[in-house]
Amino acid sequence: MGAVRATDQERSVGHGEVILDVENLVKHFPLRRGIAQSLRGGPELAVKAVDGVSFNVKKGELFGVVGESGCGKTTMGRTILRLLEPTAGRVTFEDIEVTALSAEQLKQLRTRMQIIFQDPYESMNPRLDVHRIIAEPLRIQGMVSNSKDAIPYIEKALEDVEMTPPEEYLYRYPHELSGGQRQRIAVARALVLDPEFIVADEPVSMLDVSIRGEILNLMLNLSRERGVTFLYITHDLATARHICDRIAVMYLGKMVEKGPTDNLVKHPLHPYTRALIGAVFVPDPKRKGFGKVLKGEVPSPVDPPSGCRLHPRCPIAQDICKEVEPELVPADDNHMVACHFALG
Amino acid sequence: MSKSNTQTGISAPTFWEQYRRKPLGMVGLSIVAVYVFVAIFAPFLTPYNPKQILLADRIAAPIWFRSVLPKYDDAPSTVRITLGPDEWAVSEATGGKLVAEELEGTAVSVIEFEPVLKDEDVSEGEAGLLEIEEYPEEPEKSVVELSHVVSYNCSPPKTFGLTFNYWVDASSDSKTELEFVIETPEGKQYNLWGKSCSGTLGSQPARIDSRDLTLKQRLGLTIFDDPAPRVFSSKGDYRLLLTARSIPGEEPTRVYISNAEFYIPGNVHGLLGADHMGADLWTQLIYGTRISLSIGLSAAGISVAVGTAVGIICGYLGGVVDEFMMRVVDVLMAIPTLPILIILGAILGKSVWNIVLLISAFAWMGTARLVRSQTLSLRERVFVESAKASGASDAYVMLIHILPNVLPLVFAGMVLRIPAAILTEASLSFLGLGDPRVATWGRMLHNARGFGAFTTLAWWWLVPPGLAITFLSLAFVFIGNTVNEILNPRYRERS
Ligand SMILES: Nc1ncnc2c1ncn2[C@@H]1O[C@H](COP(=O)(O)OP(=O)(O)OP(=O)(O)O)[C@@H](O)[C@H]1O
Ligand code: SF4
Ligand SMILES: [Mg+2]
């Protein structure tokens, strides 16, 4: 995957202008309670999938969100696009407050914000062919009135994802394509509206290792050549490290650390990030606490631990960690961490 | 949601490729094809229409019984002759003649008598007086006798009849007599009917029926005797004689006789005999195919369409609408359908449309539940979210993404609902709640039960509609199960 790797120069976070701003985003899924439970009263229970996340993404940037399965990455991505209604918080896209838009305004905004899903087979209706799958956003948005008008758009999108010649793929069904081709179609579909911002939710995790690089490369090229901004969601720090300009690490609905890729990977500050890196890269014996495997299981997001959510599993936890929740504070330039002992 | 369910995106050629290999499915399809053929070509498969009655005697047996059962060897088949001016032969005529006249498009036989030629001498003096005295004693009658030969070569019938209308146009001093006689091959004459009048007479019906009491009296029979077997006791040529006698007045006397219908109802008739009204049972059976197929298809179509719409809307939108509709479904499913249908049928009136709507109204709930549960899982599918991410409305998602994916499930259900609808209609009709104006299989059975098919063991009336319903229902069950096996392999065990 070496070819995919962006140079440090390219990664300079000098893009400046913020395109997406997420402020204290919260998404809880209320649990259905039985009648007896409701009558007895007691607290409303909810899956606290995303529980107060703030960050921003700069124009043209590839922003990675890394975390274990179930930590709320997908929920966050969906809530940002308002495919889920947020419980609280604010999402601003350029100067548009996404969280305050009406359905009609939201529909217009969808031409500018798109999403690529994890499973390219599931994300396509098996009854539709490639042509109709890619044309769908155009038709929904009323940009073409019939399928013939859509052809130039579709061919361009297919060329953008390097599926040439486009005619060869137009009338195939998803099951007639390989996994990698399917995911290219998914990218083409996301691109056909010419969006500025794309949420890519684990776009390669379902793919064969050998073709992951192609798709990541494709994203990288789109980002560098067309200035498309990506929010790249993954549980795999290695892929994020290869393509992302900045990375944020999530644990149980919270962001625990974020910073420029090199900085974060080479000098992780949070014990959880260190554990993640330890699981991916060869541990450096000189560094304290590096690579220590966390004990125990991820606690339930319905009833997360008090204080710092990592404390039952943290190798360096102290008493304060059980009571006081650490804030996400700047450690150095652009690098932020939420741990009482990360800076000490 | 597993991949196997995603594979319901099966193309038509592939589907047919798989369907062909299922013997039961092909049997079902062939049977239905035969029914559809019969339904479409019904008018070409029978010379009668289902509304025609008096085609034969009540509960006449099939005509082919004659060659199969000795008992029916020379059972009479229906004789029906229309006698117009061309059919009547004038066998005797004095002072009158038969002319054909066209009245309102139909030919009418007119017997025309010449007027009395007033002798100059007679009109004055004693001679005239003398004439008048003699007049009642020795009337100078003119006679015209019309005859028609009918050859009858069967065993004696149970009844016969002749109907026509007649009227007389004459001056008031005239007298006219009409008489109908049947002459047997042996030369014996039965005087069955007579009528006399003076002057003009308006249109009158003549209904000569062998079961008529006055007719029996006229022949000197008791009311328990049957004239028909006596009159038509032997085989050979019978002569129907219609005689008009007249003492004409000053004007010509004209006796008008409309086309006369001579009718001996047969004991055997058509492919399947006749019902209590003498209507053709074969005709009812094949026209019943039309009705049953249309009722089955439309009731199944309507109920499945309603069920699919309700299921998709409830499943996709959820919330209060869903809660409410699902309670409605529970209630409708809990109440027994047939009694409710009977009551509603009685209130709303007996028309085929009402019956289709009623059957549909109580048959959509199963589909609604099935579709709803399918929709609940479909709406969580990523391609639905993907469409929403491009700005798709609820209606768009329901129509483009949910509907096509529930159709295979619904399609098999619809095929299986057709026989259910057909059977419900048959039950309602059998109970007398069907549309009395149309011949359906249920109504055939209803009539058979009500008008003596059981007591006379007229199995040719009972069995065909029963078999027709059974085979058609079976055929649809075969097709439905086969379709289910192919489109919804997971439901295989259940069916
Ligand atoms: N619609 C929902 N209703 C209730 N709970 C949900 C719903 N969607 C997600 N969750 C819960 O929210 C939590 C976060 O889920 P999410 O899918 O966002 O995690 P993730 O980080 O994307 O995990 P993965 O890597 O497995 O995709 C999980 O505990 C999940 O069970
Ligand atoms: S705050 Fe405490 S428990 Fe949380 S990560 Fe830091 S040391 Fe561990
Ligand atoms: Mg996820």
Image: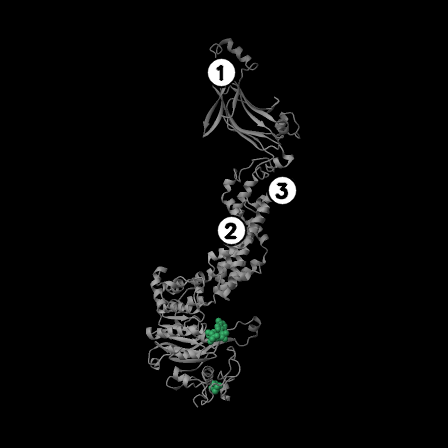
Whether label 2 touches label 3, CB < 8 Å: no
N-term-proximal mark, 2 vs 1: 1
Q: Give the image quarter of residue A202.
A: bottom left
Q: Give the image quarter of residue A211.
A: bottom left
N-term-proximal mark, 1 vs 3: 1
Give the residue number, with chain letter if any, for mark 2: B297
Lateral position of residue B405 relative to residue B474, left or right: left
Lateral position of residue A205 relative to residue B221, left or right: left
Give the residue number, with chain letter if any, for mark 1: B116
Rendering coords of residue A44 (x, y %):
52, 75
Of A42 and B385, which appears nearest the observer? B385
The Cα–Cα distance between marks 2 and 1, rounded to whole angstroms, is 73 Å
Give the residue number, with chain letter if any, for mark 3: B459
- The residue carrying pointer 3 sits among few (fewer than 14), some (14 to 19) or many (20 or more) residues within 10 Å by Cα, namely few
Of B337 and B291, which appears nearest the observer? B291
Do marks 2 and 3 share a subunit? yes
N-term-proximal mark, 2 vs 3: 2
Instruction: Name the subunit of mark 1.
Output: B
Which of labels 1 and 3 is toward the front?
3
Instruction: Name the subunit of mark 3.
Output: B
